[in-house]
């Protein structure tokens, strides 16, 4: 249990413990909170490392990858991946683009940051735009990544969204951040 602290929101942390640790999730934490009203409640949330997302564009076409995400199944997504310990987000973005698609990019722009599920999950994502793509050989991770890479027009992306082929909320949020560069 961690020593009690005071937060800027008026919540008081009474105690925190790690309830579970596992592969893919840094841990499930339980924190006893005292709210400004005096109510005490246990808050359970997931801890996971930050990630990067790359919206890679070439001549108004967006690079999408189709992969299997256990337990949901196959879906179309933009390039995403974890940030390794000590790695800068831009370095992770460049690495993930190269690993998943083989592409490298001449121009990079940071589009923003997003949270997966505030209050339940601490994970944040750093969103980048990559342009001026150059083809190369993909280098998928040895963890069993099964990727199919396509260059999708705005019409194709709209169709995939409408038909439920893109159902990843993080990809949808990334598309909103990129709307100035890739109009849907």
Image: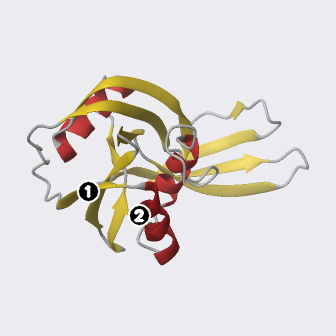
* Rendered view: 79 above or below 86: below
Q: Earlier in the sequence, mark 2 or mark 1?
A: 1
Examine the rendering and report whether any part of residue 29 can be seen: yes
Tell which residue pokes out farthest to the right in this image: 37
| Residue in the picture at 41% in, 71% down | 165
- All told, the count of numbered labels is 2
| Rendered position, 140 above or below 8 | below
| Alpha carbon distance from label 2 to label 1 | 10 Å
Which quadrant of the rendered structure holds the C terminus? bottom right
In the rendered image, the vertical position of residue 22 relative to residue 162, given as above or below: above
Query: Looking at the picture, how far across and down is residue 180, in whole percent?
Result: 57, 38
Q: At 12% from the left edge and 44% from the top edge, which residue is drawn? A: 138
Using residue 42 as the reference point, say whether residue 180 is left or right of it.
left
| Coordinates of residue 29 in the picture (x, y in percent) | 51, 51
Q: Nearer the viewer, residue 101 or 151?
A: 151
Coordinates of residue 110 in the picture (x, y in percent): 48, 27
- Relative to 184, residue 163 above or below: below
Closer mark to the observer between disc 2 and disc 1: 2
Query: For residue 11, which quarter of the picture?
Result: top right
Q: Between residue 11 and residue 159, name the one nearer to us.
A: 159
Q: Nearer the viewer, residue 124 or 103?
A: 103
Which quadrant holds the N terminus? Answer: top right
Q: Using the image, tell me which numbered label, if any, was put on residue 71.
A: none
- Which residue is disc 2 drawn over? 156
Label ID, residue 150? 1
Give yes or no for contact between labels 2 and 1 (Cβ–Cβ under 8 Å).
Answer: yes
């Amino acid at each position: 249990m961690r020593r009690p602290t005071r937060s800027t929101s008026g919540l008081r942390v009474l105690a925190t413990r790690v309830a579970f640790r596992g592969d893919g999730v840094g841990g499930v934490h339980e924190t006893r909170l005292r709210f400004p009203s005096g109510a005490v409640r246990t808050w359970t949330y997931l801890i996971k490392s930050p990630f990067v997302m790359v919206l890679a564009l070439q001549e108004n076409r967006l690079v999408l990858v189709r992969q299997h995400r256990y337990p949901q199944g196959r879906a179309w997504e933009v390039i995403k991946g974890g940030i390794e310990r000590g790695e800068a987000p831009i370095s992770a973005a460049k690495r993930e683009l190269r690993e998943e698609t083989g592409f490298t990019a001449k121009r990079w722009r940071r589009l923003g940051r997003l949270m997966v599920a505030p209050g339940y999950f601490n994970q944040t994502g750093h969103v980048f735009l990559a342009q001026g793509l150059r083809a190369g050989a993909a280098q998928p991770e040895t963890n069993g990544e099964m990727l199919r890479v396509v260059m999708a027009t705005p019409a194709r992306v709209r169709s995939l969204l409408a038909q439920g082929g893109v159902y990843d909320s993080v990809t949808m949020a990334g598309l909103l951040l990129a709307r100035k560069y890739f109009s849907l």
